[in-house]
Amino acid sequence: MTTLENHPEKNIIRAQLRQNVLLKDLSEADRAELEAHLVIVDGNKGEFLLHQGVREMEQYFILDGILKRVVSNPEGKEMILRFADENDMETSYAALRLGTPTPYGIVCVTKARVASLPLKEWIAFLNRHPETKELFEFLVMRGMSEIMAHTITLHLLDAAGRVHRFMRKHPELEDRIPSKELASYLNLSAETLSRLRKRGKI
Protein backbone atom coordinates (compact mmCIF):
# COMPACT_ATOMS: atom_id res chain seq x y z
CA MET A 1 0.00 0.00 0.00
CA THR A 2 1.58 3.26 -1.19
CA THR A 3 0.27 6.79 -1.39
CA LEU A 4 -0.40 7.92 -4.92
CA GLU A 5 2.09 10.76 -4.62
CA ASN A 6 4.89 8.34 -3.68
CA HIS A 7 3.98 5.58 -6.13
CA PRO A 8 6.57 4.90 -8.88
CA GLU A 9 3.77 4.63 -11.48
CA LYS A 10 1.87 7.71 -10.31
CA ASN A 11 1.64 9.25 -13.78
CA ILE A 12 0.07 6.10 -15.26
CA ILE A 13 -2.29 5.83 -12.30
CA ARG A 14 -3.38 9.45 -12.66
CA ALA A 15 -4.17 8.79 -16.31
CA GLN A 16 -6.23 5.73 -15.29
CA LEU A 17 -8.13 7.75 -12.68
CA ARG A 18 -9.10 10.23 -15.40
CA GLN A 19 -10.96 7.36 -17.11
CA ASN A 20 -13.01 6.47 -14.04
CA VAL A 21 -16.74 6.95 -14.47
CA LEU A 22 -16.90 9.05 -11.30
CA LEU A 23 -13.75 11.12 -11.71
CA LYS A 24 -13.42 11.89 -15.41
CA ASP A 25 -15.23 15.25 -15.20
CA LEU A 26 -13.37 16.61 -12.16
CA SER A 27 -11.41 19.82 -12.56
CA GLU A 28 -7.65 19.65 -12.13
CA ALA A 29 -7.93 21.37 -8.75
CA ASP A 30 -10.61 18.94 -7.54
CA ARG A 31 -8.61 16.00 -8.85
CA ALA A 32 -5.51 17.16 -6.99
CA GLU A 33 -7.56 17.56 -3.81
CA LEU A 34 -8.82 13.98 -4.07
CA GLU A 35 -5.51 12.44 -5.13
CA ALA A 36 -3.85 13.74 -1.97
CA HIS A 37 -5.98 11.22 -0.02
CA LEU A 38 -5.50 8.18 -2.27
CA VAL A 39 -3.43 5.08 -1.57
CA ILE A 40 -2.72 2.41 -4.17
CA VAL A 41 -3.44 -1.19 -3.25
CA ASP A 42 -2.40 -4.24 -5.29
CA GLY A 43 -4.42 -7.38 -4.61
CA ASN A 44 -3.88 -10.95 -5.75
CA LYS A 45 -6.57 -13.29 -7.03
CA GLY A 46 -8.82 -14.33 -4.14
CA GLU A 47 -7.58 -11.61 -1.80
CA PHE A 48 -10.11 -9.63 0.24
CA LEU A 49 -9.98 -5.85 0.01
CA LEU A 50 -12.91 -5.57 2.43
CA HIS A 51 -14.27 -8.19 4.81
CA GLN A 52 -17.97 -8.64 5.46
CA GLY A 53 -19.08 -7.33 8.85
CA VAL A 54 -16.47 -4.62 9.40
CA ARG A 55 -17.09 -0.95 10.14
CA GLU A 56 -13.83 0.48 8.78
CA MET A 57 -14.85 1.03 5.17
CA GLU A 58 -13.08 2.27 2.07
CA GLN A 59 -14.03 3.77 -1.27
CA TYR A 60 -12.33 1.95 -4.16
CA PHE A 61 -11.60 3.15 -7.69
CA ILE A 62 -10.62 0.18 -9.87
CA LEU A 63 -7.50 0.73 -11.96
CA ASP A 64 -6.80 -2.82 -13.18
CA GLY A 65 -8.48 -6.20 -12.84
CA ILE A 66 -11.87 -7.40 -11.67
CA LEU A 67 -13.48 -7.32 -8.22
CA LYS A 68 -16.53 -9.11 -6.90
CA ARG A 69 -18.98 -8.20 -4.15
CA VAL A 70 -19.81 -11.30 -2.10
CA VAL A 71 -22.02 -12.33 0.80
CA SER A 72 -21.10 -15.37 2.90
CA ASN A 73 -23.00 -17.25 5.58
CA PRO A 74 -21.35 -18.69 8.75
CA GLU A 75 -20.83 -22.02 6.96
CA GLY A 76 -18.82 -20.28 4.25
CA LYS A 77 -21.38 -20.57 1.44
CA GLU A 78 -20.88 -17.61 -0.86
CA MET A 79 -23.16 -15.62 -3.14
CA ILE A 80 -21.66 -13.22 -5.68
CA LEU A 81 -23.72 -10.03 -5.98
CA ARG A 82 -21.82 -8.22 -8.74
CA PHE A 83 -18.58 -7.88 -10.64
CA ALA A 84 -16.76 -4.61 -11.32
CA ASP A 85 -13.79 -3.90 -13.56
CA GLU A 86 -11.55 -1.03 -14.67
CA ASN A 87 -13.02 2.49 -14.57
CA ASP A 88 -15.73 1.33 -12.16
CA MET A 89 -15.80 1.66 -8.38
CA GLU A 90 -16.75 -0.26 -5.25
CA THR A 91 -18.15 1.16 -2.04
CA SER A 92 -19.97 0.45 1.22
CA TYR A 93 -21.71 3.81 1.18
CA ALA A 94 -25.17 2.54 2.12
CA ALA A 95 -23.85 0.66 5.15
CA LEU A 96 -21.97 3.71 6.41
CA ARG A 97 -25.01 5.94 6.01
CA LEU A 98 -27.19 3.37 7.80
CA GLY A 99 -24.65 2.95 10.59
CA THR A 100 -24.34 -0.80 10.02
CA PRO A 101 -21.35 -3.09 9.37
CA THR A 102 -20.71 -3.72 5.71
CA PRO A 103 -23.07 -6.52 4.60
CA TYR A 104 -20.67 -7.94 1.99
CA GLY A 105 -17.03 -8.46 1.22
CA ILE A 106 -15.06 -7.16 -1.76
CA VAL A 107 -12.66 -9.69 -3.27
CA CYS A 108 -10.19 -9.70 -6.17
CA VAL A 109 -11.39 -12.05 -8.93
CA THR A 110 -8.13 -11.50 -10.80
CA LYS A 111 -4.95 -9.72 -9.86
CA ALA A 112 -6.17 -6.17 -9.32
CA ARG A 113 -5.05 -2.65 -8.49
CA VAL A 114 -7.26 -0.06 -6.84
CA ALA A 115 -6.95 3.49 -5.57
CA SER A 116 -8.68 3.84 -2.23
CA LEU A 117 -9.42 6.24 0.59
CA PRO A 118 -11.44 5.96 3.81
CA LEU A 119 -15.14 6.20 3.03
CA LYS A 120 -15.63 9.05 5.51
CA GLU A 121 -12.99 11.09 3.67
CA TRP A 122 -14.70 10.32 0.35
CA ILE A 123 -18.06 11.47 1.74
CA ALA A 124 -16.44 14.68 3.01
CA PHE A 125 -15.06 15.24 -0.52
CA LEU A 126 -18.52 14.61 -2.01
CA ASN A 127 -20.10 17.11 0.34
CA ARG A 128 -17.76 19.75 -1.10
CA HIS A 129 -18.56 18.68 -4.68
CA PRO A 130 -22.34 18.31 -5.11
CA GLU A 131 -22.25 17.38 -8.82
CA THR A 132 -19.91 14.45 -8.12
CA LYS A 133 -22.06 13.47 -5.14
CA GLU A 134 -25.17 13.39 -7.34
CA LEU A 135 -23.44 11.13 -9.88
CA PHE A 136 -22.03 8.89 -7.14
CA GLU A 137 -25.43 8.41 -5.49
CA PHE A 138 -26.97 7.65 -8.88
CA LEU A 139 -24.31 4.98 -9.52
CA VAL A 140 -24.85 3.48 -6.07
CA MET A 141 -28.61 3.26 -6.67
CA ARG A 142 -28.09 1.83 -10.16
CA GLY A 143 -25.78 -0.81 -8.74
CA MET A 144 -28.32 -1.78 -6.09
CA SER A 145 -31.02 -1.99 -8.76
CA GLU A 146 -28.82 -4.24 -10.90
CA ILE A 147 -28.17 -6.56 -7.95
CA MET A 148 -31.91 -6.80 -7.30
CA ALA A 149 -32.58 -7.56 -10.98
CA HIS A 150 -29.87 -10.23 -10.95
CA THR A 151 -31.32 -11.86 -7.82
CA ILE A 152 -34.78 -11.98 -9.43
CA THR A 153 -33.23 -13.46 -12.58
CA LEU A 154 -31.81 -16.38 -10.59
CA HIS A 155 -35.38 -17.39 -9.75
CA LEU A 156 -37.13 -16.62 -13.03
CA LEU A 157 -34.76 -17.80 -15.79
CA ASP A 158 -33.42 -21.25 -16.57
CA ALA A 159 -29.69 -21.91 -16.69
CA ALA A 160 -29.22 -20.95 -20.35
CA GLY A 161 -31.35 -17.85 -19.89
CA ARG A 162 -29.20 -16.68 -16.99
CA VAL A 163 -26.03 -17.07 -19.05
CA HIS A 164 -27.55 -15.26 -22.04
CA ARG A 165 -28.65 -12.38 -19.85
CA PHE A 166 -25.15 -12.01 -18.39
CA MET A 167 -23.59 -12.05 -21.87
CA ARG A 168 -26.04 -9.39 -23.03
CA LYS A 169 -25.55 -7.17 -19.97
CA HIS A 170 -21.79 -7.61 -19.55
CA PRO A 171 -20.15 -8.55 -22.86
CA GLU A 172 -16.91 -6.90 -21.71
CA LEU A 173 -16.58 -9.41 -18.85
CA GLU A 174 -17.63 -12.60 -20.61
CA ASP A 175 -14.11 -13.79 -21.50
CA ARG A 176 -12.37 -12.31 -18.45
CA ILE A 177 -14.14 -14.03 -15.57
CA PRO A 178 -13.04 -17.59 -14.70
CA SER A 179 -15.77 -20.15 -15.44
CA LYS A 180 -15.96 -21.17 -11.80
CA GLU A 181 -16.67 -17.56 -10.74
CA LEU A 182 -19.22 -17.01 -13.51
CA ALA A 183 -21.00 -20.25 -12.67
CA SER A 184 -21.19 -19.25 -9.00
CA TYR A 185 -22.60 -15.84 -9.90
CA LEU A 186 -25.29 -17.50 -12.04
CA ASN A 187 -26.04 -20.13 -9.36
CA LEU A 188 -24.86 -22.94 -11.62
CA SER A 189 -22.27 -25.64 -11.19
CA ALA A 190 -19.13 -25.28 -13.28
CA GLU A 191 -20.09 -28.58 -14.92
CA THR A 192 -23.50 -27.24 -15.97
CA LEU A 193 -21.91 -24.13 -17.48
CA SER A 194 -19.40 -26.26 -19.37
CA ARG A 195 -22.14 -28.58 -20.61
CA LEU A 196 -24.22 -25.67 -21.91
CA ARG A 197 -21.20 -24.39 -23.82
CA LYS A 198 -20.42 -27.79 -25.34
CA ARG A 199 -24.00 -28.26 -26.47
CA GLY A 200 -24.04 -24.82 -28.10
CA LYS A 201 -26.80 -23.63 -25.80
CA ILE A 202 -24.83 -20.46 -25.06
Image (spheres, rainbow, N blue to C red):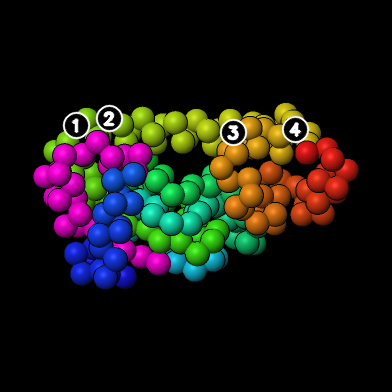
Q: Residues within 10 Å of mark 3 (few under 14, many from 20)?
A: few
- How far is disc 4 from disc 2 in space, using C-alphas? 34 Å
> Which numbered disc flags the more N-terminal residue, 1 or 3?
1
Magenta residues, start to end: 20-42
Is label 1 in contact with label 3 (beta carbons under 8 Å)? no
- List the residue tagged with mark 4: 161
Which image quarter is the N terminus in?
Answer: bottom left
- List the residue tagged with mark 3: 169
Query: Is residue 35 covered in magenta?
Result: yes
- List the residue tagged with mark 2: 134
Is label 2 in contact with label 1 (beta carbons under 8 Å)? yes
Q: Nearer the viewer, residue 104 or 45?
A: 45
- List the residue tagged with mark 1: 130
Is label 2 in a helix, a strand or a loop?
A: helix
Q: Is residue 181 left or right of residue 3?
A: right
Is label 4 in contact with label 2 (beta carbons under 8 Å)? no
User: Which residue appears at 19% of the width and 50% of the height?
Assistant: 34
User: Which residue appears at 36% of the width and 65% of the height?
Assistant: 41
Q: Is residue 185 left or right of residue 84?
A: right
**Three-letter code for the amino acid on which mark 2 is drawn:** Glu
Depth check, mark 3 against mark 2: the one in front is 3
> Which numbered disc flags the more N-terminal residue, 3 or 4?
4
- How far is disc 1 from disc 3 in space, using C-alphas? 30 Å
Is label 1 in a helix, a strand or a loop?
A: helix
Decide: is 84 above or below 113: above
**Three-letter code for the amino acid on which mark 4 is drawn:** Gly
Q: Position of residue 57 (x, y in %)?
A: 34, 55
> Which numbered disc flags the more N-terminal residue, 4 or 1?
1
